[in-house]
Image (cartoon, rainbow, N blue to C red):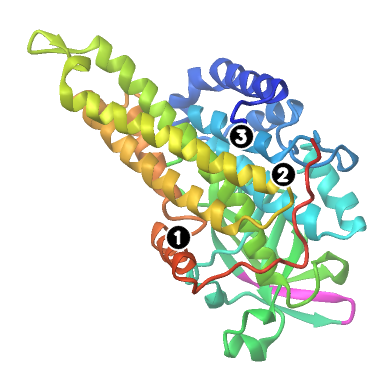
Amino acid sequence: MIDFDLTDEHQLLENSVREWGAREVAPRIRELDREHRFDKNILTQMADMGLLGCSVPQEYGGAGMDYISLGIVSEELEYVDTSLRVIMSVHAGLNCLSLLTWGTEDQKQRYLVPQAQGKKIATYGLTEPAAGSDVRGIQTVAIKKGDNYYVTGEKMWISLADVADNFLVFAWTDLEKKKNRDTSGISAFIIERAFKGFSSGTLKEKWGILAGNTGFFKMDEVEVPAANLLGREGEGFKIAMFALDQGRYTVAAGATGLIRACRDASSKYALERETFGQRIAEHQLVKEMLAHMESDYQASRLLWLRAGALKNAGRRNTRETGLAKWFSTVASERAAGDSVQIHGANGYSDEYPVGRFYRNCKGAVIYEGTREIHKLMQADYVLGFRQDKPLRCELPAIQK
């Protein structure tokens, strides 16, 4: 028998995050969004709640919760605002889980422990001005001299770029393989903001996720100790893809929360708004849009729960996580569009939250694999053109 019910511990976590978000963030998120302001106090509160290291074992400073817990946190945070879930994606998903799986004991003690405790904030640097979906197009290079690497390049569209202390950065270490676009020439590095030659800036003209910090960082021959090489030289591409499995999982769960937010806001409005002498909730086409939101929410939740169960078992989950990310983000875009439609002219006003939902949802169908990339991936799985092979490191299994 398959049990889809959350455990008592999961329900407690869900209620705790939901209550915190409703109490501490929801009343002022419109103001933060309007002012394009990232509130660092939110990070402090999330750290105090143990959220920033929720799926990191207690021995490394985390809360020791499972991957279903990470999904629950992501869904509840994005229900309030996408900017909150983005923190979990880059800090907890892309960075911390990569360090947990690929890092040496020394790296875990120096970086993972303070990150899991929320004493240090971390992010992920893969995308560049001319390289997004095409990872082979990155231009950042790392030249080894003695016991150090010297990293030069620029990363773009980086969440928490002006906030993070530590950065997981990908660069070419084999310039001959760079010429041939052979990804076995890419390596991964842990870089600190304090390293000489590192600088960052904030992107001011974003369309959505305005309460979040997004920017770029530049590296001008940044001296990185060889001890900060994550994994082995040439394993960067594998690590990047592994990290995306974790980040996409949080995006999928988060988009599920956004669908629920659209559903709840729209149903509330439909029961209050009257046209032609009756509540719009009684109009058939409004009901149809609400029904689609509900079906998309339930399907999206099942997809991320399935991916989370595989993660808990320590099994490769690229196919399932990719499907969850693709389906839920596209569904959230549809839900946000319909929620604006249900609100009519009011949906076009900042007085109601659905306009913010609409602006925020678009990013997720682009970052961490565009919807087009994910369509191709899923088709390749069906056709047998793509088969996942075990990585050198798999996720640590969560024992129940």
The residue that mark 1 highlights is: 374
Relative to the observer, which residue lies in front, 90 or 369? 369
Relative to the observer, which residue lies in front, 361 or 338? 338
Residue kind at label 3, given as amino acid type: Ile
Residue 114 image position (x, y, % from top left): 83, 43
Residue 164 image position (x, y, % from top left): 68, 48
Which of marks 2 and 3 precedes in the sequence? 3
- SS of the residue under disc 1: helix
Residue kind at label 2, given as amino acid type: Asn
Question: What's the magenta region?
Answer: 146-153
Task: Find residue 371 and report its image quarter.
Answer: bottom left
Q: Is residue 331 left or right of residue 214?
A: left
Query: In the image, is residue 136 above or below residue 122?
Result: below
Which of marks 1 and 3 precedes in the sequence? 3
The residue that mark 2 highlights is: 312
- Position of the C terminus, as image quadrant, is top right
On the question of residue 54 being in view, the answer is yes
Residue 396 image position (x, y, % from top left): 79, 50
Residue kind at label 1, given as amino acid type: His
Tell me if mark 2 has few (under 14), some (14-19) or many (20+) residues whose alpha carbon lies within 10 angstroms of its own: some
User: Label 3 vs label 2: CA separation?
Assistant: 15 Å
The residue that mark 3 highlights is: 2
- SS of the residue under disc 3: loop
